[in-house]
Amino acid sequence: MNRDNKQQIVSELHDVFNSVNIVVVTHYSGLTVAEATDLRRRMKASGAIFQVTKNRLVKRAIAGTQYSPISDMFSGPAAIAVSEDPVAAAKVAVEFSKENEKLIIIGGALGPETLDSIGVRALAELPSLDELRAKLVGTINSPAQKLVGVLQAPAGNLARVVSAYGSKKDVA
């Protein structure tokens, strides 16, 4: 790899680190191509990116970003999982590591806060941003639905009384 390619990779990674909310550092030693492809597909489906990295290039790219405190995590066969959703990358990485012991969670960072592997696993248990939005909409919508039901009940009762009264006159 020539110097221009390395500078381009460092620049692209620097831009990635400036645009994401979470970085999860993993060791991927022993993953087959099929397993790595499966992991990348899962990451992409959740809005995250999984990328195998060269440690020296990542350390250069991470310098000057909010994630610079995690630069010492990059040793050995390192790969990163990043996403704008603060939970997505951690959730997929932890789920995959439970199924495949070849992927080891080293740690990461959520914004300026450094996380160890336990912190990443705890973060993965949180609901995603979309799930939180759905719960919030459901919570907001629930009282409105109940209010409509309460308001419609008297009209329904009145209609049943009128109908019963009308059928009573028909019989008589």
Image (cartoon, helix red, strand yellow):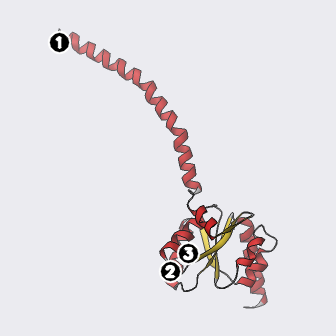
Instruction: State the residue lying farthest toward the right.
Output: 64
In the rendered image, residue 95, in percent from the top left (x then y), is placed at: 52, 69
| Residue at 53% in and 67% down | 45
Q: Amino acid at mark 2?
A: Glu
Instruction: Specify whether residue 47 is in view.
Output: no
User: Which residue was labeled with disc 2?
Assistant: 35
Q: CA distance from mark 2 to mark 1?
A: 77 Å
| Residue at 56% in and 54% down | 130
Quarter of the image with the N terminus is bottom right
Q: Amino acid at mark 1?
A: Val
* Callout 3: SS: helix
User: Which residue was labeled with disc 3?
Assistant: 40
Q: CA distance from mark 3 to mark 1?
A: 74 Å
User: Which residue was labeled with disc 1?
Assistant: 171
* Badge 2 or badge 1: first in the primary sequence: 2
Instruction: State the residue lying farthest toward the left.
Output: 171
Crowding at mark 2 (Cα within 10 Å: few <14, some 14-19, many 20+): some
In the rendered image, residue 22, in percent from the top left (x then y), is placed at: 67, 65
Report the mark closest to the observer, 2 or 3.
Answer: 2
